[in-house]
Structures are given as C-alpha cells and as structure tokens.
Amino acid sequence: MNKTSEQSEAILRRPIGIFDSGVGGLTVYRALHNRLPNEHFVYLGDTARVPYGTKSLATVERYAIENSQFLAALGIKLLVVACNTASALALPKIREKIGLDVVGVIGPGARKAVEAAGARPRIAVIATEATVQSDAYAASIRQACAIAEVVQTACPLFVPLAEENWTREPETFSIAGKYLREIKEFEPEALVLGCTHYPILRDVIQQTVGENVKLIDSGEACADEVARLLNEKGLANPHRVTGTRRLCDDLDHFYVTDAADRFGRVAERFLGAKPAKLEAVEVFGVDELKESK
Amino acid sequence: MNKTSEQSEAILRRPIGIFDSGVGGLTVYRALHNRLPNEHFVYLGDTARVPYGTKSLATVERYAIENSQFLAALGIKLLVVACNTASALALPKIREKIGLDVVGVIGPGARKAVEAAGARPRIAVIATEATVQSDAYAASIRQACAIAEVVQTACPLFVPLAEENWTREPETFSIAGKYLREIKEFEPEALVLGCTHYPILRDVIQQTVGENVKLIDSGEACADEVARLLNEKGLANPHRVTGTRRLCDDLDHFYVTDAADRFGRVAERFLGAKPAKLEAVEVFGVDELKESK
C-alpha cells in the first residue's frame, strides 16, 4: 500500500459529523446509524442554545457555522445538518465556510415526498415556525416538481410533547387533531415530518391524518442521500464493523454544549439507549474572538 | 437645589432594569408597572438563548451576568431578575458582579406563600425542571418557616401552551389535570406559580386545584418587594407621570437578543399591547472578549 492510498484509507475511516440544535437530531442519527452500520458518527447537540426554531436568520446562521467548524476541526469526512431550521436557513453559509460535503434534511425530505406522491403531487409539510416561514420545504418541493401543491403548518407543541414522551396520551391526539385539521382537509398524498422531533410522534400523526397518507421522515431521506453520496465519491468505510452495532455504542461520540445529563435522559427516551461517550463542550464565541483581534 | 441633591434627583429618575430569559418576564413587568406607575422600566429578554429552564448552573450564571451587565451599563437604579431559573441559580453571582440592589422572584414568592398559608404551612410549587431541581423555592420557604411542608412539580408543557395562548382549550385543562394530580392530593393552602409563564394559565390552574388554594404570583410578590425597597432606600421616583400610563408605552424600553418580531407578537398575546420601543441587541461574548485580552 503506497502513501496516497494509506492517506485515503485514513479518510475513509473518518467519522461522519452530525449537528443539531439539541436532542431532536438523534432521530436523524438513528436513521444514519441503521442505514450505514460501518460508519462512525460524531454528534453535536447545541443544547446551550436550543431551540433554533424561534430564532432569526442571522442568529441561526451564526450558531450553525460555529457548530460546523467545531465538527470540521474533529476531522470528519462529511457533515450532516440534522436540524431542519439550520438546513432551511444556513446551508449556503455552511457550505461557504466548510470545505466538506454537507447534507441537510430539507432537500432529501422534499425530493422523497415528490417521489412518494403522484404525477400532480399534493404534499403537506409540518415543521417549526422558522422552517415554515423560511418556505424552504415548499421551494425544494417545487424545484423537484414545479406543479406540486404544498400546504405547510407549524406545530409548536409537538416538540415538548415528544420530549415529555407523551407518544400515546389522549392530549397528544387531541392537539394533533387541531394542528392537522387543515392538512387533513387538503388530503395530501405525502406528509413531510419537517422537524427532527416529529418522528417520535409518528404513530399519533399517522392515525390523525389517516393510513393512506405517506409519512416522509426527512432524517431517513437524508440517510439515503448520505449513503448514495458516500458510494458515489468512494468515501464509504470499507472496514466492516465486527459484531453487532448498537445505537449509542462506543464507536459513536456525542458532544453537547450544555446539560449532558438531560441529553442522556432524553436520548434514552428517544433511542432506548444512553450514549456510551457523551461530553459537554464549548463551541461558541469562536468568531467573536477572531473578529476582535 | 445644590449639586448633591441634583445628582440624587437624577438617580431617582433612572429606570428599573428587568431581565428574563425571554417573553415570560413580561408578566413580572406587568406586575411592576401596575404597582409602580411612576417608574420607568428597561426590559431585556434574552430571546437568543431562551429557555434557561433546561440549562446547567454554569450556563445560566454566565447568561445572567451578561444580561445584568448590559442593563447596569444603561444606568438603572435597581435590577429585577424576573426569570425564576436565573433567580434560583444565579442571584449570588449577580449580586457579586453588580453594585446595585437586586431583587429576584423566588424569595418574594416564597415569603408571600408562607404569609398566605396557616401556622403549619402546606405549600406547593410549580416551576421549570431546573428551578425544581435547584430546590430554591423549598429552601426559601423553609427559611421563612422551618416547619413548612413543600411539594414541587415541573410542568414543562405549560410554557409552550402559554405561548400558543391556549388558555381555555380542553387540552390545557387535561394536561393541567395530569401535572397537578399529586399537588391536588397534597391539599396545599398555597400554590406558587414559580415560572413567569404560568400566570397566563392562572384560570386553568385555579380551576384544576380548586378555588380554596391561594395562587401566589411570584411576579406580584416581587413587585411588592421592589416597592418596599424603593421606599426604604428613598429611591422611588417622586415625579408623577402625567396622564394615564399604559403597558408597553413609550416610557418603557424593551430590548431582546433575537427575533424582535416574535417578541412583539407574544407581548401582544400576554399584555394586550406591543412595546412602543423595542430593539434587538447583542449582549453576549462580553466576558469572553475581556478574558482573551
């Protein structure tokens, strides 16, 4: 083996970086982990500054770039922006600053919804206030299919309901009924779960809109796109992991910007396992320091 | 009038500073405004970093100090920490850093609850996870009355329900029924609303626990304490405001660290008026910059 192939060997073994505003991105991590069992992951949850969904464009961009720079410095081979709000608002800026392939959740989710729908697609999107206001899903859907009809609704209570693990409570069904009334009347073929927390409430949402509506998990769509990209660019890790991989095992490393205990507890609710490697770190202030010099 | 009295005259005309992690502190502002119509207020909502209720001690302390320094630099005569989480976790550090009188919401709320209860007080507290875990209300209540019995419960969904303005919805009653079940069985004499958002759901909470339980609004208790302190220290503004004062009129100045539009909208839901003076500012990074020099 010559030096160049040794170097590229090393690149293939590098982890895939994932960042999210907090714990929600764990559903995207789960999708990636299930889809790519030979890959290692580094996850950053920006729990000190969560949520992004109610913050402004400039702020979300700044946080997203700081998170991306933190992960890039760890030597990742590809960056996944698991947070829908950051994907909607900050992807161009991240790509500008980071010399790596960057995959968000909006584009993959939108394209998968168009594939799942018919020739004249009727697609509904549920997401945070900021994602809905950004119109990013609707723009991505129309880019994939110009004649698609799109209805979008923000569901602010879904995030705390998911974090409380109220996945079967009658209150959750009742709230879902209110939020999804307009979408039900729209009779979509596909409904995009445009916030990382929403797959936790998947059953409630499916029962509310009816079994004939195809639910699109943007995290799963993102995992498919990452798999395709790794193969296309020859970046997939050729070293098979021996034995069985489990979610949150010690091949994956988790970082949070605050309150690691709470992150561990919610990870257990969402994934059934606590991260084996979980660390609190400081990622912010980097840019301000640079600018002040 | 000699120079010294001119100077102290100027001090009396200075505004009272209020900070909160976001919009919730507007209920404390309302209480202060109603109690002290001759005073002017400067309010800082740290909307870029909200919520504090799920963050760690170190992070809440850091944010609280940055907010306090921002308001102190504006020339306030007294600082109100409207945020329960910051009051629970960061009051000693703030007092250490700021050469001003500082009033939080925990102490006043706890003392008012003890006054409202009987000789062997039975007091319930509802608050965020962080406030409950800090045990600050229980400690303050026991300081006022060593034999008081205290039960505390976190009600995470109350904040988003208040922000959605779901103040009469059956889902809110149902969720309140679940959260407050243990407290109802405890049969308290007084129930402290230990989070700034909870007064918005006051009617739901009162109906759920029963009319015989005295609800203690920590914001109102805090306003009483501020009024007492101003009189005691001769700091009250002697200049009567001519005409009628309204909430959010142009004598009060509001600052937010992000998303001023959303703050304005929620202010209208909470107070029935949008701030006449509302500005987005940057308060953070101050300490990091200093330390790097």
Image (spheres, coloured by chain):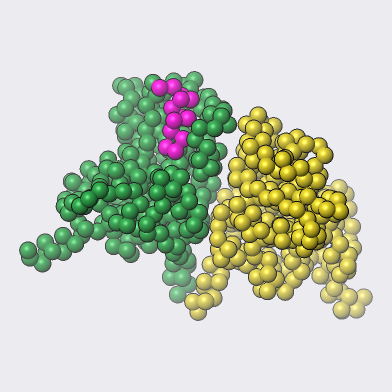
Chain colours: A green, B yellow
Q: Residue at x 85, y 65 (%)?
A: B230
**Outermost residue toward the right in this view:** B1
- Magenta-highlighted residues: A199-211
Q: Residue at x 34, y 48 (%)?
A: A247
* Residue A287 in picture, x, y percent from top left: 44, 66
* Residue A282 in picture, x, y percent from top left: 45, 65
Q: Residue at x 37, y 57 (%)?
A: A276
* Residue A7 in picture, x, y percent from top left: 16, 64
Residue A63, quarter of picture: bottom left
Which sits in the foreground, B189 or A83? B189
Q: Report the quarter where the N terminus of chain B lies.
A: bottom right
Left of B10 or right of it: where is A248? left
Relative to A111, residue B124 above or below:
below
Q: Residue at x 66, y 30 (%)?
A: B169
* Residue A196 in picture, x, y percent from top left: 43, 42
Which sits in the foreground, A242 or A142? A242
* Residue A181 appears in view: yes
